[in-house]
Image (spheres, rainbow, N blue to C red):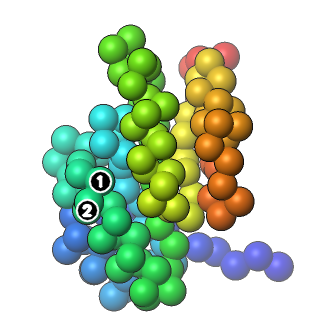
């Protein structure tokens, strides 16, 4: 039987440390430029992602990365370049919305056996 996982949103390193200290099994943060949580977020810089992932792994927990917005035209062009940098940090899970095959392209273009891909599509877009 599978156990329940406590997944906590974190926008700052302080919140990440609290989440781990208070029993979170995993944390998630938004990807720069492509997340609903990016504006007030310590993880808007890739260096902070690296620190966050290291901190979470040192505690034996998992780090999920959310990429859950529909990019505007000017962001579609840079998406694959930007996601490459994030995937190189090797988060445990990459949470994406599946729009126009974007998630599929990432999984095929940047295969990484260590990353799980969680993809969903709201009924609003069907």
Residue at label 2? 48
Residue depicted at x 33% and y 14%: 74
Q: Residue furthest right?
A: 1
Residue depicted at x 50% and y 51%: 87
Which one is in front, 12 or 111? 111
Q: Position of residue 37 (x, y in %)?
A: 29, 45
Q: Position of residue 51 (x, y in %)?
A: 30, 71
Q: Quadrant of the C terminus?
A: top right
Q: Is residue 4 above or below residue 60?
A: above
Image mark for residue 71: none
Q: Quadrant of the N terminus?
A: bottom right
Residue 76 shown left or right of residue 113 in the figure:
left
Which one is in front, 114 or 2? 114
Residue depicted at x 56% and y 34%: 97
Number of numbered labels in the structure image? 2
Q: Residue furthest top?
A: 73
Q: Residues within 10 Å of mark 2 (few under 14, many from 20)?
A: some
Q: Position of residue 42 (x, y in %)?
A: 20, 57
Residue at label 1? 46
Q: Are circles 1 and 2 on residues that touch, CB within 8 Å?
A: yes
Quarter of the figure with residue 4: bottom right
Mark 2 residue element:
helix
Q: Is residue 81 visible?
A: yes
Residue 14 shown left or right of residue 62 in the figure:
left
Q: Is residue 79 above or below residue 100?
A: below
Quarter of the figure with residue 119: top right
> CA separation, marks 1 and 2?
5 Å
């Amino acid at each position: 039987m599978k156990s329940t996982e406590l997944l906590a949103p974190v926008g700052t390193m302080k919140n990440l440390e609290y989440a781990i200290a208070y029993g979170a099994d995993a944390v998630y943060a938004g990807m720069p430029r492509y997340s609903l949580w990016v504006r007030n977020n310590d993880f808007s810089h890739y260096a902070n992602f690296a620190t966050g992932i290291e901190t979470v792994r040192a505690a034996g927990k998992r780090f999920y990365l959310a990429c859950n917005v529909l990019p505007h035209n000017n962001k579609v062009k840079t998406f694959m370049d930007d996601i490459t940098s994030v995937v190189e940090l090797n988060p445990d899970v990459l949470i994406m919305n599946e729009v126009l095959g974007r998630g599929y392209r990432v999984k095929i273009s940047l295969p990484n056996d260590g990353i799980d891909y969680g993809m969903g599509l709201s009924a609003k877009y069907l």
